[in-house]
Image (cartoon, helix red, strand yellow):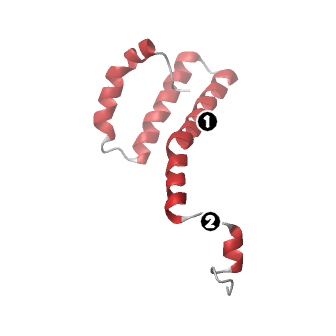
């Protein structure tokens, strides 16, 4: 996933520092624009083969899963603890005293 060696991260630090300044006010469409252009640059530099398209999809899917595992899952677990579980049976039978 995104866990590349420390020495390999060095070449990206200047770019990431620039992006950090921009990301304080970025909109979702602008984030999509940046990600899209990174993918296009990869495509242009690596070629137009099915293998490269699959690699790009794999990176996006892996990032989606990483986002879920590291942030969304923890958020949802916190809300579960805060508000209690939601079970379909609770919706079917109504309130706690069973009177619906």
- Element under label 2? loop
Q: Quadrant of residue 23?
A: top left
- Say which quarter of the image contains residue 20: top left
Work out whether 59 lies above or below 86.
above
Residue at the far left in the pictured view: 21
Q: Residues within 10 Å of mark 2 (few under 14, many from 20)?
A: few
Label 1 crowd (10 A; few <14 / some 14-19 / many >=20): few
Q: As drawn, which residue projects farthest toward the front?
A: 97
Q: Name the residue under label 2.
A: 86
What residue does disc 1 label?
Answer: 61
Residue 13 image point, x, y percent: 35, 21
At x 65% / y 83%, what residue is drawn?
97
Closer-to-camera residue (31/40): 31
In the displayed structure image, the side of residue 94 where residue 82 appears, left or right: left
Please provide percent x and percent y for residue 99: 68, 87
Q: Mark 2 vs mark 1: which is more N-terminal?
A: 1
- In the image, residue 48 above or below residue 66: above
Of the 4 image quadrants, the one containing the N terminus is: top right
């Amino acid at each position: 996933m995104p866990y590349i060696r420390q020495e390999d991260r060095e070449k990206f630090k200047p770019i990431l520092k620039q992006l950090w300044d921009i990301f304080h006010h970025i909109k979702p469409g602008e984030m999509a624009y940046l990600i899209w252009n990174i993918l296009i640059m990869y495509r242009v530099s690596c070629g137009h083969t099915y293998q490269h398209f699959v690699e790009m999809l794999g990176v996006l899917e892996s990032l989606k899963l990483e986002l879920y595992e590291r942030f969304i899952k923890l958020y949802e677990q916190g809300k579960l603890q805060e508000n209690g579980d939601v079970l379909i049976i609770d919706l079917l039978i109504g309130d706690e005293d069973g009177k619906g």
